Amino acid sequence: DQQVKQNSPSLSVQEGRISILNCDYTNSMFDYFLWYKKYPAEGPTFLISISSIKDKNEDGRFTVFLNKSAKHLSLHIVPSQPGDSAVYFCAAGNTGTASKLTFGTGTRLQVTL
Amino acid sequence: GAVVSQHPSWVICKSGTSVKIECRSLDFQATTMFWYRQFPKKSLMLMATSNEGSKATYEQGVEKDKFLINHASLTLSTLTVTSAHPEDSSFYICSARDLLAGDIETQYFGPGTRLLVL
């Protein structure tokens, strides 16, 4: 049972434009969410997080939006840069479950020139 | 941000031997660390939760006698793959738990260890 889903395995965006990566979840007990960026043969790098008490969190070029009623979150990258090309994972956690995170399957973002 | 290191970054070993992977939190103390395994083109699979000073908690389907975890200090956890076989070849990644502002817990990941068992 995939509790965190990233339905788009890949996304291609032109440099300078907005990249929107989507993530859906099924477990209403999740109360915080994170986005990670991963290059091949490296560990994931933390990007941004959001608590379920918020609907938006912004950090530089990265903004995460949370729609609890739809159980949906998205990561916006504006403007997209070639160095953003990587696999992006969303992850969800519940503060009562020993800090375990449930990861989505990832979306490969390719930013083209 | 918090930095987590792993050693070695890659290892090749013969079938039947044991391999130890170290995970260190470099600039913070981590009472809890996690060990993941990633298969090609797949998501991260949590293997176990490592708690400082106590036994690790293994996920369903993970053999605790095969994947020995020790978390002897607040900055070091080790994963030992015992009697490794070719099917154990994989990319192993550790993470350490830390608190962000606003009390959101997050995990900071090490760079991973590529294991190839011949």
Image (tube, rainbow, N blue to C red):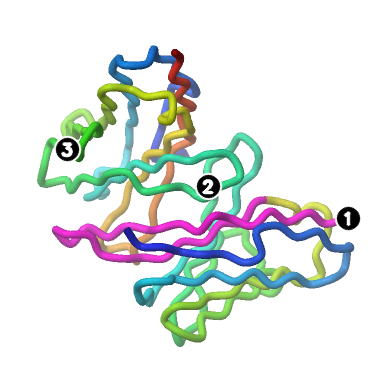
A93 above or below A104?
A: below
Q: Could you tell me residue B72's position as x and y percent? A: 51, 86
Residue drawn at point x = 32 percent, y = 44 percent: A47
Report which residue position mark 3 lands on. Answer: A58
Sequence-earlier tag: 1 or 2: 2
Q: Position of residue B98 (x, y in %)?
A: 31, 66
Query: In this rendering, does residue A7 appear at all?
Result: yes
Q: In the shown orientation, is residue B14 left or right of residue A71?
A: right
The image position of residue B50, as x and y in percent, is 48, 73
Q: Determine whether label 2 and label 3 are within 8 Å by CB.
A: no
Chain letter belonging to callout 3: A
Residue B118, disc: 1
Instruction: Inspect the magenta stretch and tell me whether residue B102 lies in it.
Output: yes
Camera-near label (1 vs 3) is: 3
Looking at the rendering, the stretch of residues picked out in magenta corresponds to B91-118
Q: Is residue A110 magenta?
A: no
B101 lies left or right of B99:
left
Residue at numbered disc 2? B44
User: Is residue A58 shown above or below B116?
Assistant: above
Residue in the image at 25% along x and 46% along y: A49
**The residue under label 1 is which amino acid type?**
Leu
Mark closer to the observer (1, 2)? 1
At 46% across and 85% down in the image, what residue appears? B73
- Residue B59 visible in the current orientation: no
Report in which chain the residue with disc 1 lies: B
Q: Are marks 1 and 2 in contact (CB under 8 Å)?
A: no
Residue type of the residue flagged with mark 3:
Glu
